[in-house]
Image (spheres, helix red, strand yellow):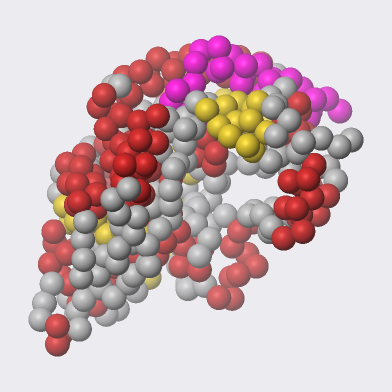
Amino acid sequence: MSSANTPWIERDLKHVWHPCTQMKDHEGQIPLIPVRRGAGAWLEDYDGRRYLDAVSSWWVNLFGHAHPKINAAVREQLERLEQVILAGFTHEPVIALSEELTRRAPPGLTRCFYADNGSSAIEVAVKMSFHYWRNLGRTGKRRFITLANSYHGETLGALAVGNVELYKEIYQPLLMDVVTVPSPDCYGQPRASWAAHSRAQFRFMEEALERHAHESAAVILEPLVQCAGGMRMYDPEYLRLLREACDRHQVHLIADEIAVGFGRTGTLFACEQATIRPDFMCLSKGLTAGYLPLSTVITTEEVYRAFYDEYEKLNAFLHSHSFTGNPLACAAARACLALFDEEDVLTANRARAAHLGARARELADLPHVAEVRQTGMIVAVEMVRDKAQRTPYPFAERRGLTVYRHALTRGVVLRPIGNVVYFMPPYVVTPEEIDLMVDVAREGIERATCD
């Protein structure tokens, strides 16, 4: 049936190749939804149908769509300067943003290196760690230690240090070799035992460091939540143990806070919950509240000094992106950070998270839900074939797709990761909108597991 959406869909399918998508799906069972505009937690298509953005438009949107203060900041910056090369030049937005980020980051992180997106930030951190040890004469330290089920992006370096096979397996011949250790993932553990389980799992990391520290530049991980790996979660105790072990073994710690930073876990940065400071902290997604592509790697003065030398020594970090430190993106990021102070967002989020968690835990009673887990504003619901044994559904059955399609008919965007239905809403979501999200998820799960 033709609608106002139809011409946009037809034009799209002639030329646009969508990310993380089997394009054939969009010719049948998964119609595209052309979005005309957004406001607050809602998106609207060309037919005027509205959709509650329960996944923050791929985890980037913090304060809702078309936020007036962020709009104004970008508009004002647009009238002054839209872009300038950051090699040999600078500008007020990138200076002020760097001051703000280093003020808020764990103490000791003092230097910001900018890129365009999360995967690029990981590439920067990986290269910078390797290059640091090279500049110190320790050229043998060239490997990286990573966690099973981890995800750090889809460029080749980021894929290499990740471990979600769906993304990685086909490109394995192109990737550098890494050391992978079991995750501290607490799936199936009572919440009261998360710290003990994470502590027990740390023995694998300790063994890996003892065996490989001499050849390893860094350990890289997502603090507290492995997002693309199915929203698997673990306790801050693991981070505390890892920081001490990395220091003892002289290995860097790279914290990938791209998805979990800026309040998603309940604190501005997830590392705060372990009171640790990584050697490199990678940020993107919520950095600009979802407005424009921007990422940064914040590192220490010690790392910075290893590259600071006479030109002839060739110790400089020769990595660049055309839009490094883009003024418009920096203006959006500064406005985003200002909102955290003006609206006391983290305090308000505690109430939102409590309501979201309480409502979502009701889903644990469903016969095919093995677990409902939560870290801050991130809640995940694990669908399984057999609840007692936690036997997963085969991926080819696409149970999550049933949830997704049902949710759209009810005006909610839920985009499960395989068989994991999750909620990661923007921080403007209301209790009534949370209720709608959870009610629709219940309906979708019941439909997806009814056989």
Q: Position of residue 147 (x, y in %)?
A: 45, 53
Task: Name the image quarter holding residue 5.
Answer: top right
Q: Residue at x 51, y 42 (%)?
A: 227
Which is more toward the observer, 228 or 111?
111
Quarter of the image that includes the C terminus: top right
Q: Residue at x 46, y 62 (%)?
A: 158
The residue stretch that appears in magenta = 423-451
Q: Position of residue 399 (x, y in %)?
A: 76, 36
Instruction: Answer whether residue 449 is magenta in the image.
Output: yes
Q: Residue at x 34, y 70 (%)?
A: 320
Task: Name the image quarter holding residue 44.
Answer: top right
Q: Position of residue 157 (x, y in %)?
A: 46, 67
In the displayed orientation, state which residue is furthest to the left. Answer: 310
Residue 233 in view in this figure: no
Q: Position of residue 8 (x, y in %)?
A: 73, 46
Is 174 above or below relative to 166? below
Quarter of the image that includes the N terminus: top right
Residue 96 in view in this figure: yes
Is 271 above or below relative to 247? above
Is 300 above or below relative to 446? below
Instruction: Answer whether residue 112 is magenta in the image.
Output: no
Which is more toward the observer, 186 or 121?
121
Instruction: Look at the magenta stretch and give its main secondary structure.
Output: helix
Q: Residue at x 68, y 33 (%)?
A: 45
